[in-house]
Image (spheres, rainbow, N blue to C red):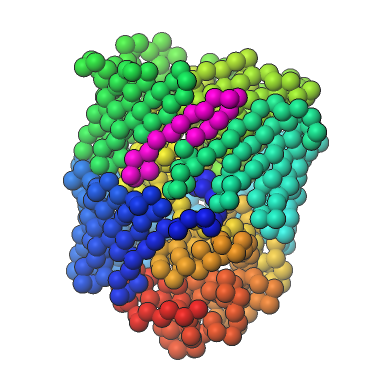
Amino acid sequence: MVSLAGESDPLSQGTTYTYNGFSQPLTVTDDLAHQTTFAYDNAGRLTSLTNPKSEVESYGYDAAGRRTTVTNGRGKTRTYAFTNRGDVSSLTMPDGAYEQWSYDGNGNVTAYTNPLSQTILYAFDNAGRQTGVDYPTGTDTTFGYDDANRRTTMVDATGTTTWSYDNADQVTAFTSPQGSQTSGYDDAGRPLTTTNEQSEVTTNLYDSAGRLSKTTLANGQVSVYGYDARSRQASVTHKVSDTGSTISSEAYVYDAADNLSTKTEGGVTTTYGYDDADQLTSESRTGYSASYTYDANGNRTSKTLGGVTQTYTVDDGDKLTSIAQGGTTVKSYTYDAAGRTKTVVTSAGTTTLNYDYESRVTSITYPSSATNSFTYNGLDTRVGKVDSAGTATYRRDGADVLAPVLSDGSAVYTPGVSQRRSGATTFDLSDRLGTASRQTNASTTTTATRSYDAFGMLLASTGTPQGPFGFAGGHGYQEDADSGLKLLGHRYYDSSTGRFLTRDPARDGRNWYGYCDNNPLGSVDPSGYKNEEEPKLPPFVVRRRDYNHNPGPFLPPSDKDYQRVLDNLRMISETKRGRELLDKAIDEKMHLVIDIDWDEDGGAGGRFDDEGRIIWDPDHSGDRSGSPERIFAHELGHAITNDQDNWYSTGEPGDNVRNNENPIVTDPKWNHGRPERPRTQY
């Protein structure tokens, strides 16, 4: 999930923390005095988390210190079992759903059995690279690699996909894209220009703080972005040209916890309200009023629209079972054993959904017997759709779910910017959420508008909006016209209920069906993969070095090495010293540059060079320096303090800093459960 909050908070007291003697947080209090409380046992293990609404999530452990139970605010418990080496071997949900995993000696998952007792097998080569997926029936998936460990082939139910690379590990050929686009970047990895196959150029400018300040589209339209003193987007103004008239504008105001409190567009102000857990509870403006309530695990329990209340009922596994109005059920749901929505029943009849072994929706059949069907590649990416409009074949700038759609057979897209069909280009004018609320033509004339509620349900439109990229379309959300569902990466989202159709495959966060923690104006979820709040991080870019140690191009967020860096930053942000370091980087407007070097000089696993770059080997396994995660944290300290003299390794086992505290070395969570003596110097 991607937060839309600003980078820094100079005008406020900021979030405050209290800690125990092992630098573990005891309380976290935001500017609105909303407090989250943590409790630990004598071994330093987290035993409970109490949110600002006094909703408690508690945790149990086995003798080896492995978390075996999670009990949510509703009193419902998930139970985990582990292998001897500490890998999760099974998970039992509160509703009885049971799934299992098997592993090889290297910790790779070799088999997964879902709650339907269907087993998927996974194959790996001696280098630990995944080479195949074997399904119980149907076409399997295989992967091939070159000598540099780069994926070169994928054979799946849709055919064969191939990749080619240059010496800098940059993809030079990819079989799928129909049409192309090129991008130019500045030294911080920010996109400056995007040129599509029609030679239409989009240009971005940034202010001295590194924030996007202006975008110029190919038809000359200009979007100007303003920010408040806390770096939160305060306005967007769309104009016909640099000096031309205003087409539309929006202004935004936030509360002290960074929640959007008002939006003003065309002289109409919408006001938003939140509970102590920052869940959206109301949105209102002249002629429109909606309110929401939630239970202790973040399930919506009611929605009131225009004075009419609908109540929601969920089972022990957080599955929505019915919606009632005035005591009468207006919609009911059934699920399979894996917790996937199977049927939706209304007065119009029954809609039925089918899934494949990866829990991807393969077909939807409506009460009229009309059917939509969907196909996917071996990386979960939707590549085909058949609906009432005909057949769409999706071509992307890559093969994974975050790769932008460039074509669907009827139109060519520049994601978040424009689309071209029947020889004419339509341009999107988007709000802070990336929602294309207005579309214009080549002469900057408005051709269509659309408005949504906070959760993305379409409320009204004018003209004929073009394409599937409406609500949060700038982040890749795709709206399916027949079903009204939205595809967010791996999962389908129902904006009418504010829920996904299936559980989060990441199995993270407190509610695995919920969307953006019920704060749909504070973040977006392009992958549909994690239901957790992102910590505030400084801007960063990641590159891979070649075997001559020359840096390659900036990696996209979908790249696995980018994700490894992001995971480390998230981990570091959970510790006291790590959070202080990251806040320092944010306050000082730092942009971090991390280079992945697979054969790092010196064998230490990482270093901080004279040009201010972190150079890191994520596969380092040396005993002296510690784990790759600890090495990364250590080098991050160098980078943020810009201090080569007082932040360096002693060479002593288990203690790779002197005069300073490694951001993760004193946290028992990352130090094999053994907290070391806290050190507080920078």
Is residue 407 shown above or below 184?
A: above
Q: Residue at x 39, y 61 (%)?
A: 16
**Is 283 above or below relative to 47?**
above
Give above or below for 429 relative to 622.
Answer: above
Question: For the point 35% across and 59% down, which residue is it?
Answer: 28
Residue at 37% in and 18% down: 306
Task: Report how many numbered discs are placed on residues in the image.
Answer: 0
Q: Give percent across and percent down for residue 188.
A: 68, 58
Camera-nearest residue between 541 and 574: 574
Answer yes or no: is residue 173 visible: no
Lateral position of residue 488 relative to residue 416, left or right: left
The image position of residue 206, as x and y in percent, is: 71, 50
Q: Is residue 305 magenta?
A: no
Is the magenta region chiefly helix, strand or loop? strand
**Residue closer to the observer: 46 or 183:** 46
- Residue 240 is situated, as x and y percent measured from the top left of the image, at 76, 28
Give x and y (percent) for residue 617.
56, 71
Give residue 267's quadrant in the image. Answer: top right
The answer to which of 643 and 132 lies nearer the viewer is 643
Residue at horizontal 55 percent and vertical 30 percent from the top: 264
273 magenta-colored: yes
* 430 relative to 529 in the view: left or right: right
The region drawn magenta spans 262-279
Between 649 and 209, the residue placed more toward the observer is 209
Q: Is residue 295 visible?
A: yes
Residue 163, compared with residue 353, is above or below; it is below
